[in-house]
Image (tube, rainbow, N blue to C red):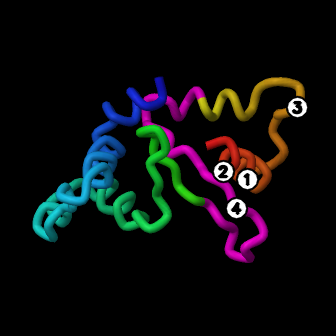
Amino acid sequence: MLREHQQNDPIIGTVIGWLSTADMVPTVSVLTSSDTEVQDLYAQRQSLRLVDRVLYRNYERPDATLQFQQVVVPRTLRGECLQASHSGLINGHFGIEKSRERLRQLG
């Protein structure tokens, strides 16, 4: 399901297409004429990885203490991810910074 949502997302799907094959690298004119969100995501290409056709971002804290692969969540699933990170007995809301850190770990 995640793979399908990422492929159908106009931002993520575009970047996945460019990262999937070497001959799909966008020209400067294609990149600059693309949506700014596409440009922003593609600018992170050094930290992006496709694993089983699902796009992940390698996340590392500035102090290098925490590293993991973060799912790039398509717009259609963001609400569900936020809901999932706040519901349940062990999640709850522990403030902005702790919630951000939890979301980074989840995806």
- In the image, is 74 to the left or to the right of 94? left
Distance of label 1 from label 3 (alpha carbons) = 15 Å
Q: Earlier in the sequence, mark 3 or mark 2?
A: 3
Observer-nearest of 66 and 100: 66
Q: Which residues are magenta?
A: 59-80
Q: Earlier in the sequence, mark 4 or mark 3?
A: 4
Distance of label 4 from label 2 (alpha carbons) = 10 Å
- Numbered label attached to residue 67: 4
Numbered disc 3: secondary structure? loop
Numbered disc 4: secondary structure? strand
- Residue at the disc numbered 2: 104
Q: Amino acid at mark 1?
A: Glu
CB within 8 Å, label 2 to label 1 = yes
Q: Is residue 94 magenta?
A: no
CB within 8 Å, label 1 to label 3 = no
Q: Amino acid at mark 2?
A: Arg
- Residue at the disc numbered 3: 90
- Residue at the disc numbered 1: 101
Observer-nearest of 55 and 90: 55
Q: Position of residue 52 (x, y in %)?
A: 46, 38
Q: Amino acid at mark 4?
A: Gln
Around disc 1, counting alpha carbons within 10 Å, would you say few (fewer than 14), some (14 to 19), or many (20 or more)? Answer: few
Q: In the figure, 89 relative to 82: above or below?
A: above
Q: Position of residue 5 (x, y in %)?
A: 40, 29
Numbered disc 2: secondary structure? helix
Q: Amino acid at mark 3?
A: Ile
